[in-house]
Image: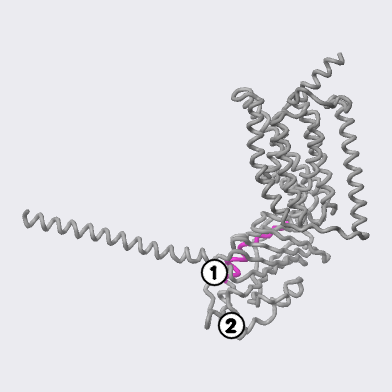
Amino acid sequence: MSRIDVQDSSQTFVHHLSRLGSRLGALLVLLCTLLPAVTQAHDIPSRITVNAFVKPEGNTLTALLRVPMEAFGEISFPLRGPGFIQISEADFAIRDAARVYITESFKFYENGVELTEKQLGAVRVELPSDRSFVDYDRALENILSEPLADSANLFWRQGVLDVMVTYPILDEGSDFSVDPLLGTLANETTTVLRFIVPGGAERIFNYIGNPGVVDLDPRWHQAALRFVVMGFEHILEGTDHLLFLFCLVIPLRSLRGLIPVVTSFTIAHSITLISSAFGLAPNVLWFPPLIETLIALSIVYMAFENIVGARLEHRWVVTFVFGLIHGFGFSFLFSDTLQFAGGHLFSSLLAFNVGVELGQLFILLLVIPLLSVLFSRFVQERIGTILLSALIAHSAWHWMLERGTTFSEYQLAMPIVDSIFLASLMRWAMLLLIIAGAVWAMYEVFRRFALIEPLSSYGPSDNRSDNLSDSLRNKKTRES
């Protein structure tokens, strides 16, 4: 090999080594850049609670907020010793944290128009043991007071930051709403927001994450629209309610057959939903797990009926019973969202129920054509009914066992017989009368329009898999 070839090879090797070194250097720089981000990501707190007061007064809307300082992991506060915050030197960092994390995360609207002009007022680092945020006046007085002394020896991650933000408004009687975007401060951010209505009344909102735009003192149509959407979304997100509806329509897809079943389910869950909204449901810890277990049981039962082939003339009665249970299930979500109703309980309740019905109608309009296509082109109806019902029963069975286990962990105690207990019995007796009246009224209407057979015709059947429409058709033939 010549000297020139060796020299060229050496130069080539050095060139490749230089390029490799450059790439390794770039990779090292990238890793160094990413490492702080990874470290900061781990600094995000798992759970925090934000407290807020909002009060329109005259031509100013004032917001007072208290946020745990552990949410400000990317702000460098002046520290001393083992991590005590140097409050006397932290004003710039504190106001920077307030601007970045708080004022930009609260968007207020007056009559639908965003309030873009805002002024960051007083800020104050406070001890976590402070209880001034129990009411608006005390919170405001505390924020405007002298700052804590450095001798408080407050670890910065243990402190809370109180902030006052003001917005110019047209009138204190306007319609105000807020879009709080504080959900990213922690893995789970709970916000307790109190809106002081002109006149002194207080509306309390307690939510997790970002709930979207919230009307702080909604008018009836605003509350109604919100609850229609909530009811519709609840049906689409509630897997157990969807599977129950699916079980209803698998063997029963004609309009004549669906009317009594869907009507009875609607009336039943409306009765218990309305009753629960007015405080009839037991206010005990074991009641929600019991209802959730019974909801799973209702799915198992309906699926089993489909598999063995039940008399579908009776299905509206069974559906009514299970509808009462599902109504209590709907009420749990409604009670959690009742805070968004303002002073419009009844209209919000009706709107939520309308949303639920619209969701059910949407599901039925979607599922029934799909089942018709499935049974007409791909699988025999009886076999398809058994297979689909078995799959649903399998899932519901596991839900029932899991929820039943949760329910069994509660210790049930005998109620104390007193005036409160007797009053509850009277209310439940009234509810039973309403239920009995609803069943009688539905039976009379369904019988008059030939949607069901009279009670006298109910009895053992050799062919339990006949559907309702065939039964009614045979009845009309006999009468003619």
Tell me which secondary structure the magenta stretch mostly adopts: helix
- The reply to whether the magenta stretch includes residue 54 is no
Whether residue 479 sits left or right of residue 208 in the image: it is right
Q: Are marks 1 and 2 in contact (CB under 8 Å)?
A: no
User: Magenta region: which residues?
Assistant: 96-110
Amino acid carrying label 1: it is Gly
Tag 2: Cα neighbours inside 10 Å, few (<14), some, or many (≥20)?
Answer: few
Residue at x-position 76% and y-position 30%: 258
**Magenta residue check for 108:** yes
Residue 366's quadrant in the figure? Answer: top right
Q: How did the renderer colour the structure?
A: one colour
Kindly identify which residue carries mark 2: 88
Task: Spot the residue most to the bottom.
Answer: 151
Q: Nearer the viewer, residue 375 or 140?
A: 375
SS label for mark 2: helix
Q: Position of residue 292 (x, y in %)?
A: 73, 48
Task: Indicate the secondary structure of the residue bearing disc 1.
Answer: loop
* Residue tagged 1: 73
- Nearest to viewer (mark 1 / mark 2): 1
**Residue 55 placed where, x, y %?**
75, 66
Q: Quadrant of residue 47?
A: bottom right
